[in-house]
Image (cartoon, helix red, strand yellow):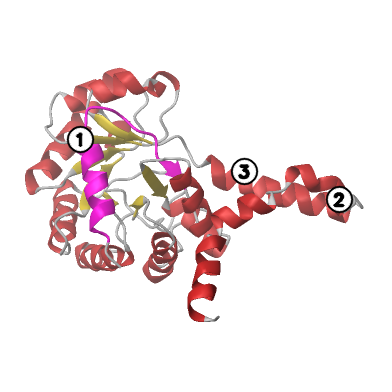
Amino acid sequence: MDYTKRRENYRAVLAGEVCVHPGSVFDPISARIAEDLGFEVGMFAGSIASGTVLGAPDYVVLTLSEFAEQIYRICRAGELSLMVDADHGYGNALNVRRTVEELEAAGVAALTIEDTLLPMAFGGSDGDGNLIPLEEGVGKMKAALSGRTDPNLVVAGRTSSIRVSVDECIRRVKAYEAVGVDAVFLAGASTKAEVAAVNAEVNIPLLLGGATGELTDKEWLGAHGVRVALQGHLPFQAAIKAVYDTLKALRDGVAPGDLRDQLASPDLIAQVTRRAEYDQQIADYLR
C-alpha cells in the first residue's frame, strides 16, 4: 500500500495555523467511521491498543508486533492519517529504531516516542511518571529518526516532564528539537501558561494530550503552536458500555426486538463495512 498521501496530509496539519482534534480509533470500523465523519487525523493510543488487543490495562504489556498488527489492520481499511502513541519504543534506543521501522511499514502517518521510564520498575507503582535521563531520551529520538525511511513520516518526541517543572520540560523539548524531531507531544499540560511557555521556546509544532479545562479552547491552542489536541478516548469507552449494556439486557431477558433503536442500522453497517465495494468485486470477478 502507498501511505504517502496520508503522511503528507498529516504534515499539512502540522504546517497549518489551526488546532485539530483527532478521532480516537481502535479498529478498522472505528477508523472508517472517523474518516467518513471528516476527521483530519486518527489517534490510536497504546492504552487503547492494550485494551483492544489484550483486554489489559495500560501497563505496557502489549508487544510491538501486537501493536503493529493492529495498526496495519486499521491503516489498510481506509485513508485516515493515523498517529500512534508508541510508548517508550518497547525498550532502549535500538528497540526504538526497530519500532519506527515496524510502525512505518504498518502505515502510520505519525508516531510519538516518550521519555518516561517504562515499563513499571520493581517496587514502583502505576503513575510514578519517572523520566529517563535526558541523554537517554536524546539517544532514543536520534534512533527513531534513523529508523525512518519515508521522510514524510512524522516522528514526534513525547514528554511528561511538565509535571516536574516547566523549565525541565523546556530543556527536554529543546534538546529533542535540536536532534530533528518533527513535533513534540506534551503529556500532562494543564494550563495555558504552561503551553505558552513551551511554545515560546521552540520552533516546532506541539501536540497535546487530554486537553481539558482551559486547554479546550481550540482557537487559543492553534494560536500558540498546538496543531493536534486529544480529547481522550471516548469511542472505546462508549463501545465497551454499548456491548455491556446490550449483553446485560439480553441476559436479563429483554427481547432483541426491544433493543433495535440502540443498534446500528443495516445502512450504517453496509457503509462502514464497505459492502458496496465488495459487491462490485463480486460482480467483476465472480459473475
The quarter holding residue 214 reads: top left
Write down the residue under mark 2. 257
Inspect this view and state whether residue 58 appears: no
Among the two numbered marks 1 and 2 on one chain, the one whose residue lies closer to the N terminus: 1
Going 54% across and 59% down the picture, which residue do you hit?
Answer: 52
In the rendered image, the quadrant that contains the C terminus is bottom right
Q: Decide: marks 3, 1 in contact (CB < 8 A)?
A: no
- Highlighted range, magenta: 3-24
For discs 2 and 3, the disc positioned in front in the rendered view: 2
Q: Nearer the viewer, residue 188 or 251?
A: 251
Look at the numbered disc 2 and give the secondary structure of its residue.
helix
**Disc 2: CA contacts within 10 A as few (<14), some (14-19) or many (>=20):** few
Write down the residue under mark 3. 238
The span from disc 1 to disc 2 (Cα, nearest Å) is: 50 Å
Residue 256 part of the magenta segment: no
Q: Nearer the viewer, residue 284 or 38?
A: 284
Q: Position of residue 62 (x, y in %)?
A: 45, 64
Look at the numbered disc 3 and give the secondary structure of its residue.
helix
Q: Nearer the viewer, residue 278 or 110?
A: 278
Residue farthest along the left direction in this orientation: 178
The quarter holding residue 107 reads: bottom left
For discs 1 and 2, the disc positioned in front in the rendered view: 2
Going 49% across and 54% down the picture, which residue do you hit?
Answer: 26
Write down the residue under mark 1. 205
